[in-house]
Image (tube, rainbow, N blue to C red):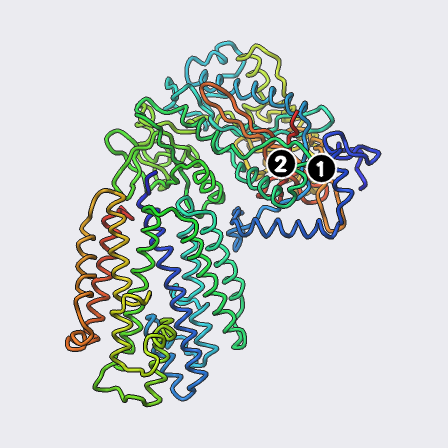
């Protein structure tokens, strides 16, 4: 396999030898017949199809249910590498929760002059209703999916924090199931750390945040927008694996000061609601009045201690890409430590000097919407045509505060299996983090997303990305 | 664990649609066979099949001929108000998606595969030569879902809702098929032993997968009154009206044990089953077979409605 020297390949060094975590896998791979491997790849796809692991792509007709392409070459992470990464993730997530508590209470970080006041007060993800309220157990972001990218042997960056409703964990779990079915011999040869207890840990973590009104064993439910939502498979999957109820807004109503679900035997209260629904849709009485997906009045019950909502309403403010640029300061402010995970240098286009720089260097930069997600509405400068650059420059000048810009990172590659053999493709990593009052629990590995198109840097599944199983090796 | 009203409803309807799709496939298969063996009455036969499933007028409006290829394609994959086998299986799968957390992975995967295979098979109009195979495939996949249900599901309320959907639908189906052909079974009109009747009776029995069982029990002679007795009152035949009514009552009884509470529907279903147990086929003919079947379908529908209400399928 030829490696492009301008990118760090995680599997092969420049001489074509596997890096240490890939040694055993490389030896195994060298003994496999390419035709048989390709056959395995088709088998894997068939398994996913049968299981119904699908994803809907917006804006495309007839695309109701698509498979996310799965690549059978695993991404392998050494034990020491992972230990270092998890310390960085834990520090970051801890700081995020402290930050959320602070901005909804005394706003010490603003008083200390470390964060401009308008970053909070004018932020659409900031919820006035949360001011002065502390969620059960003090946890704001119960489930976090920090997106990491790598640019060299020891260079990792946190790209996004996803503190609102990170998705993809079902793929992490199903990818592993599929790999174990396809290549059991690899798992007996290598010590790969388990991920399959994630649902159990999620349940335990959510239960640990039961609200004051909860009596006895907490009743946990997953709130989904319904079967036509792009991530419905994941919602059903998690509810099923956790032994939780899968509810929609119309299954719920307020009964005696509690949020209750309509069961075959009448209405029964829910203690913890893992909602896979944005804040805006959660409560038509508090937010978008015409949303039929949420529960009218749930915010009142929440603020009165009648239910736990995970993640907490208003936690999404840390997903804001302008806030992101302050995260290193946020980490320093709340932990008193230097950040272990680096942030990607970020230009805030709201600042005139930055805007000037961004406009001058547009062809080298990645520009993102401050409130965007899923790879929609972003510009990848080096991949854009002159026309696209000019159009985007005009958009930037019209509403500079809507955008931030970052250098185009030389994302690491991991090979994927193609019909012509292995070929390097760019990847990122989304580890899943569970936060409860007692601990921060990080599942070893996470979801590796891979840009399947040669040279592409966009890994989002909505933009044609695929996934890989991610292996963290045991000590 | 509790069961959401919506989930119970989705299970109930998932199995109603599965049962309905299987029945329609079987009816189509019987019609196809009839039109192959008896070309001269084929048009009538197709009309009565379409009447049974309530699509006679919809078909008339398409202007299509009563040719096997046209009718079969219409019944299996046509866009006829959700009345085709394909759209029923799709609805069954949608309901399975809603009830995903209540069913086992095996049941879900069998249902999902049933849908995927059916959709792929019916992506293009079927040629006559491919029809028997396609119909066989549908039968096989329904059996896989049923097998997964029996083999992997806990016998709790969830299972009982699934079974209730199956038997409510099946009872309705048997009564409907008989009602369209009830005149064939009337003693006054039937010409014992004529080939026409033998063929018609054969078609009727086939539409209910009953021909083998019936012959087993009546190896020598085929009589209209025996057929009627068998299809309505034989508690050993799994598609008979009595069998379904007893099952409905029994599944409700388990549900009552599970929830420690009886609902209005319990008395309703028990009464219907008891009435059927105590009536003879002669009494049914005295009352009028058509009237009897109509009354039964109404009572059955009322029970279905009461189940939905008692167990809060909707608000």
Q: Secondary structure at mark 1?
A: strand
Badge 2 sits on which subunit? A
Chain on which label 1 sits: A
Any part of residue A342 in sight = no
- Image position of A427 (left or right of B86): right
User: Can see residue A257?
Assistant: yes
Q: Position of residue A384 (x, y in %)?
A: 68, 41
B89 above or below B41?
above
Task: Name the quadrant of the N terminus of chain A.
Answer: top right
Task: State whether discs 1 and 2 lie on one chain.
Answer: yes
- The foreground one among A264 and A348 is A264
Give the CA distance from mark 1 to mark 2: 10 Å
Residue identified by numbered label 1:
A414
Q: Which residue is mark 2?
A: A448
In the rendered image, residue A382, in percent from the top left (x then y), is placed at 71, 37
Q: Which residue sits at x=22%, y=84%?
A: B187
Quadrant (top left/top right/bottom left/bottom right) for the C terminus of chain A: top right
Q: Quadrant of residue A221?
A: top left
Q: Residues within 10 Å of mark 2 (few under 14, many from 20)?
A: many
Tag of residue B65: none
Where residue A236 appears, as percent x and y from the top left, is 45, 42
> Marks 1 and 2: CB-CB under 8 Å?
yes
| Mark 1 or mark 2: whose residue is earlier in sequence | 1
Q: Is B78 located above or below residue A315 in the figure?
A: below
* B257 relative to B115 in the view: left or right: left
Q: Does A7 sit above or below residue B144? A: above
Q: Position of residue B100 (x, y in %)?
A: 42, 46
Q: Secondary structure at mark 2?
A: strand
Q: Is residue A18 above or below residue B249?
A: above
């Amino acid at each position: 396999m030829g490696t492009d020297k301008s990118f760090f390949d995680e599997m092969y060094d420049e001489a074509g030898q596997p890096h240490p975590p890939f040694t055993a896998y490389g030896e195994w791979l060298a003994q496999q017949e390419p035709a048989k491997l390709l056959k395995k790849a088709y088998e894997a796809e068939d398994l996913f199809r049968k299981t119904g692991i699908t994803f809907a792509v917006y804006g495309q007709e007839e695309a109701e249910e698509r498979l996310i392409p799965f690549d059978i070459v695993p991404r392998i992470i050494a034990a020491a590498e992972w230990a270092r990464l998890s310390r960085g993730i834990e520090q970051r997530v801890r700081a995020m929760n402290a930050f959320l508590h602070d901005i909804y209470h005394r706003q010490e970080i603003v008083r200390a002059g470390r964060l401009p006041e308008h970053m909070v007060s004018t932020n659409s993800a900031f919820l006035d209703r949360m001011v002065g309220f502390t969620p059960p157990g003090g946890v704001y972001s119960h489930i976090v999916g920090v997106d990491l990218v790598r640019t060299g042997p020891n260079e990792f960056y946190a790209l996004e924090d996803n503190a609102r409703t990170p998705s993809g964990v079902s793929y992490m779990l199903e990818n592993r199931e599929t790999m174990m079915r396809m290549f059991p011999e690899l798992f007996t040869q290598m010590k790969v750390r388990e991920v399959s207890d994630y649902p159990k840990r999620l349940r335990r973590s959510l239960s640990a945040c039961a609200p004051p009104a909860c009596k006895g064993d907490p009743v946990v439910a997953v709130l989904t927008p319904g079967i036509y939502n792009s991530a419905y498979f994941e919602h059903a999957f998690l509810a099923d694996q956790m032994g939780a109820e899968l509810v929609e807004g119309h299954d719920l109503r307020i009964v005696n000061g509690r949020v209750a679900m309509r069961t075959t035997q009448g209405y029964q209260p829910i203690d913890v609601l893992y909602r896979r629904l944005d804040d805006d849709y959660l409560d038509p009485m508090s937010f978008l009045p015409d949303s039929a997906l949420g529960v009218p009045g749930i915010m009142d019950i929440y603020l009165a201690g009648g239910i736990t909502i995970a993640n907490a309403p208003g936690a999404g403010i840390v997903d804001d890409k302008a806030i992101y640029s302050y995260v290193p300061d946020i980490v320093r402010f709340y932990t008193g430590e230097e950040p272990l995970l680096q942030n990607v240098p970020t230009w805030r286009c709201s600042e005139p000097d930055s805007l000037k720089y961004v406009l001058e260097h547009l062809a080298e930069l990645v520009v993102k919407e401050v409130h965007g997600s899923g790879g929609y509405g972003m510009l990848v400068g080096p991949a854009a045509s002159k026309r696209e650059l000019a159009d985007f420059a005009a958009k930037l000048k019209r509403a500079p505060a809507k955008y931030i810009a970052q250098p185009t990172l030389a994302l690491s590659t991991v090979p994927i299996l193609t019909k012509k053999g292995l070929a390097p493709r760019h990847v990122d990593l989304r580890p899943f983090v569970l936060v409860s009052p007692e601990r921060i629990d990080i599942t070893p590995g996470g979801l590796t997303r891979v840009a399947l198109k040669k040279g592409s840097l966009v890994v989002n599944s909505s933009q044609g990305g695929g996934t890989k199983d991610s292996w963290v090796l045991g000590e | 664990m509790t069961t959401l009203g919506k989930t119970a409803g989705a299970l109930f309807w998932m199995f109603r649609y599965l049962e309905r799709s299987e029945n329609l496939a079987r009816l189509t298969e019987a019609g196809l066979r009839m039109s192959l063996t008896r070309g001269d009455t084929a048009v009538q036969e197709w009309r009565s099949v379409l009447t049974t499933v309530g699509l006679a007028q919809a078909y008339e409006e398409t202007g299509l001929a009563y040719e096997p290829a046209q009718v079969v394609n219409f019944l299996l994959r046509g866009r006829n108000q959700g009345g085709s086998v394909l759209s029923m299986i799709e609805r069954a799968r949608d309901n399975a998606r809603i009830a995903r957390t209540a069913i086992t992975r095996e049941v879900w995967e069998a249902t999902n595969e049933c849908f995927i295979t059916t959709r792929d098979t019916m992506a293009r109009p079927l040629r006559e030569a491919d029809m028997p195979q396609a119909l066989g495939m549908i039968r096989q996949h329904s059996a896989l879902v049923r097998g997964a249900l029996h083999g992997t599901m806990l016998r709790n309320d969830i299972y009982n809702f699934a079974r209730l959907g199956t038997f409510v639908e099946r009872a309705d189906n048997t009564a409907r098929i008989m009602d369209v052909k009830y005149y064939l079974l009337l003693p006054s009109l039937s010409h014992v032993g004529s080939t026409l009747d033998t063929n018609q009776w054969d078609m009727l029995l086939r539409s209910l997968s009953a021909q083998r069982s019936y012959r087993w029990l009546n190896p020598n002679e085929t009589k209209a009154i025996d057929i009627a007795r068998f299809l309505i009152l034989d508690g050993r035949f799994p598609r008979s009206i009595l069998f379904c009514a007893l099952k409905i009552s029994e599944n409700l009884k388990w549900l009552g044990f599970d929830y420690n509470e009886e609902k209005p529907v319990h008395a309703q279903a028990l009464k219907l089953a008891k009435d059927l147990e105590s009536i003879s086929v002669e009494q049914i003919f005295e009352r009028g077979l058509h009237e009897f079947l109509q009354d039964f379908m109404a009572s059955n529908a009322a029970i279905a409605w009461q189940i939905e209400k008692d167990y809060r399928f909707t608000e």
